[in-house]
Image (cartoon, rainbow, N blue to C red):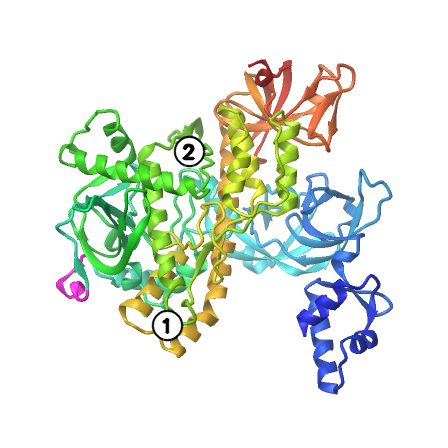
Amino acid sequence: MKEKVLDLLTTQYDALSLESLVEKLDLKTTEEIGMLQDVLNDLVASYDLYLTKKNKYILLEKMSNFKIGIVDVKEKGFGFLLNEEGKDIHIEKEQLNGALDGDKVLVEVIGTNPSKPEGKVLKVLERDKRNIVGEVKVIKSKKVFVTEDKKFKNTPINIAQEDLNKCVEGEIIAVTIDDELSRPNSIVGSIKAKIGHKDDPGMDIIELAAKYDVFEEFPADAMEQANSLPTEVTEKDWYGRKDLRDKIIYTIDGKDTKDIDDAVGVEKLPNGNYKLYVCIADVSYYIQEGSPLDKEALNRATSNYPADKVIPMLPHIISNGICSLNEDVDRCCIACEMEINGQGRVIDADVYPAIIHSKKKMNYTDCNKILEDEIPEGYEEFKDALLLANELHKLIRKERQGRGATDFDTVEPKFVFDEKHHAIDVVARERGEFEKLIEDFMIAANESVARKFQYYDGYNNGLPSIYRVHDVPSPEKVQQFIQFCNASGYPIVGKFKTIENAKVFQKLLEQIDAEGEEREIIMKMAVRSMAKAIYSKNNIGHFGLGSTCYTHFTSPIRRYPDLQVHRLLRTYFFEGLTDQRTVNYWDAHLDDIAKQSSDRERNADELERAADDMFMADYMTDHIGEEYDAIVSGITAFGLFVQLPNRVEGLLKYENMPSDMYIYDEEQNYAIGKNSKKIIRVGSYIHVKCISASKSLMQIDFEQVGQVDDKKKAR
């Protein structure tokens, strides 16, 4: 019924009454009409339909004066509706109707100037789930909650006094807000968690994480279960496992990594092909479905890595202990054994439970040195094994690139902190050859495991599972990216109205001859033009990897979907449970698991970006007054975003550009000087001085102290 209603209203220009819908849908019985009314109520509640004052129904998307989006409330009290169409709608403070920063809202466009649209909030559809974090202070002998969150500067938060009285002065708490407004310009909140004292070390990142509903402490029942698990592998754990302890299998990670969930090994076969072992920690063997640890792991769904902090999905006693593939100890794993030919293509794969004994804990830095004919101490006996692995890696990467996979190779910032956790340096996080090697080996294993589910012959050509999917980019986003490239001085030749596969997108990107920082910025825009990769029960392939069948199998310590995939491997293939009852059970549960995992991954990404912004500003507080040659990384109606050579990014407002009065041309995506007619594009260079930086506001401001220098064209 729902599909019939939506299909019908898609073809209608005017709103339809219930009676008209009944007639056009040719409904005859009272039961059918009742079902129609229930569907209409649901569609109105979900804001797919709008019910007019005359009790008629119309698709909300057909109402050009109604928009749904996220509201961005500024410190001065007014806000903007951020919507996918790209045109932000200004909302005066009086028109917010109780909406708070980050809320999903329904807005009516009320302004008459299309270039500067105005709106008013009709309804808050969904509260922003982020917590409010602040300090308990004593003011006039009364405990109160005080937050530095700028979005609540003009909105008092009412918390029950009896709850505040249970806190100590200086305690940092996370507060969640109620959906109902207590009175205009005031909201009711309740204490969700006590996260420490303001003087505790490292509170900056702990406070920020709490805002995103990420906490270090595990529930008591989960910790009780974690502490009851064994600390070493015993003979009873070998049952049903293939013994790989004699194989040259090793781990390669960052120097500081303690939770190691993948190990690899490569052999050359007599037929000239390669044997690749990807061995992954068997977390599902120790954590049963529905147990306290499993419930908390699903609640978190992912480990979080804001700046230098690790907030794990599983307690450290597990992630660094029995489930970590540590050097020189037996560990239970699930192995993906692949035969790969000389073209880098997997021609055979098997997945099974195994036991391994990692021969060495290696790190990327030392492994990369071997490619420069430098053998670090302790690596002598592994040199040939690592060179063979790199030989295979090159073949796999060439094969992946041949089917359209694109390596955007964006550079991420890495912070250096002093003993007080103040950022004293920002450096580029480099990716060497062995970082790429491990990535390619993991992708090969993920594809092989995904195919095992997808092409199983016993259940409609596949068994229910979770896939990592990445849809093709929308034609609108592709055209926006092409316009951006053209406006930035990198014209795209050819017709790219639709990007039906990864190879077409690869051909588009090959036309961009930018280098260095300019290429980084354009590649970031390319990433933004693409769909967001998510988890799903429905396999639609992974566009960015050029893969028709892909899942996440290789990080069960850090990602819940991987843990779930392990559980499905054990259920279907190791235990042979592919009966209809089992299949139906997982078919009914996997959608919820996929959604939770996607939502928490998105939340983790937002937290990590916020942490980067906070510590960039923290670093720049020591560099106010210093000058830099910066590159323009973004252009808006209110100013330029500029990036320093160390990837620190801040705002250069037009009012802080004394050389001219610059005007933003949205269509051309550039700023043009009113007097000089000088054009500033993304990729232009400009000499700037840092004039302010605020860690709490996560904000850096610059002013222009030199002329724009379009070095890109000068080359």
Sequence-wise first label, 2 or 1: 2
Q: Nearer the viewer, mark 2 or mark 1?
A: 1
Relative horizontal placement of residue 661, taking residue 394 as reference (left or right): right
* Mark 1 Cα-neighbour bin, 10 Å: few <14, some 14–19, many ≥20: few
- Name the residue carrying label 2: 421
- Name the residue carrying label 1: 458
Q: Quadrant of residue 38?
A: bottom right
Q: Is residue 479 magenta?
A: no
Above or below 91: residue 336: below
Q: Which residues are magenta?
A: 232-240
Considering the image in quadrants, where does the C terminus appear? top right
Seen at 34% across and 37% down, the residue is 435
Helix or strand or loop: what does disc 2 sit on?
loop
Question: Where in the figure is residue 212, as x and y percent of width and height?
Answer: 52, 49
Seen at 40% across and 59% down, the residue is 297
Seen at 28% across and 46% down, the residue is 341
Relative horizontal placement of residue 520, taking residue 240 as reference (left or right): right
Q: Residue furthest front?
A: 271
Question: Where in the figure is residue 34, as x and y percent of width and height?
Answer: 72, 81
Instruction: Using the numbered discs, state the Cα–Cα distance from disc 2 to disc 1 in whole angstroms.
Output: 56 Å
Whether residue 74 is visible, yes or no, is yes
Question: Where in the figure is residue 592, as x and y percent of width and height?
Answer: 49, 65
For the residue marked with disc 2, what is the amino acid?
His
Helix or strand or loop: what does disc 1 sit on?
loop
